[in-house]
Image (cartoon, rainbow, N blue to C red):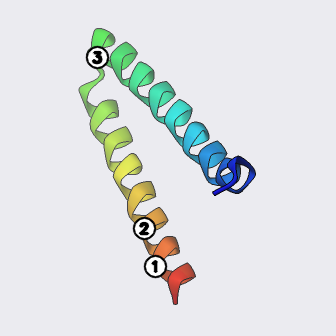
Amino acid sequence: MRSSEFLPHHGFALQYITLLSDFINLLKKLLKKKYFRLIRESLNAHNKALSILKKIKKWKRV
């Protein structure tokens, strides 16, 4: 397996990891300010986004 074949997927994974770390940092800031309702809403939004991503992956397989 060539490294060039692996790079596109790896790039996507890196983007997702940085996005996730940004999201976690945002949650930490919210925790400090005790915006519990906002945290719950943002977690719900994140879960919805993940479920949408899973559906898209399923459609791509078909």
Left or right for 23, reference 31: right
Residue receiving disc 3: 31
Residue at x 44%, y 22% (from the top left corner): 26
The residue lying toward the viewer, choosing from 62 and 1, is 1
Alpha-carbon neighbours of circle 2 within 10 Å: few (<14), some, or many (≥20)?
A: few
Instruction: Please state the horizontal and vertical placement of residue 11, each as a whole percent of the image.
Output: 66, 43
Q: Position of residue 27 (x, y in %)?
A: 36, 24
Report helix, strand or loop for mark 3: helix
Q: Mark 1 points at which residue?
A: 58
Q: Do the residues labelled 2 and 1 touch (CB within 8 Å)?
A: yes
Q: Pinpoint residue 23: horizontal percent, then vertical percent.
A: 45, 30
- Residue drawn at (44%, 74%) of the image: 55
SS at mark 2 in the image: helix
**In the image shown, does 59 or 10 lie closer to the viewer?**
10
**Would residue 45 appear left or right of 19 to someone viewing this image?**
left
Q: Earlier in the sequence, mark 2 or mark 3?
A: 3
Q: Is residue 40 left or right of residue 16?
A: left
Tell which tag, 3 or 1, sits nearer the viewer: 1
Disc 3 crowd, CA 10 A, few/some/many (<14, 14-19, 20+): few
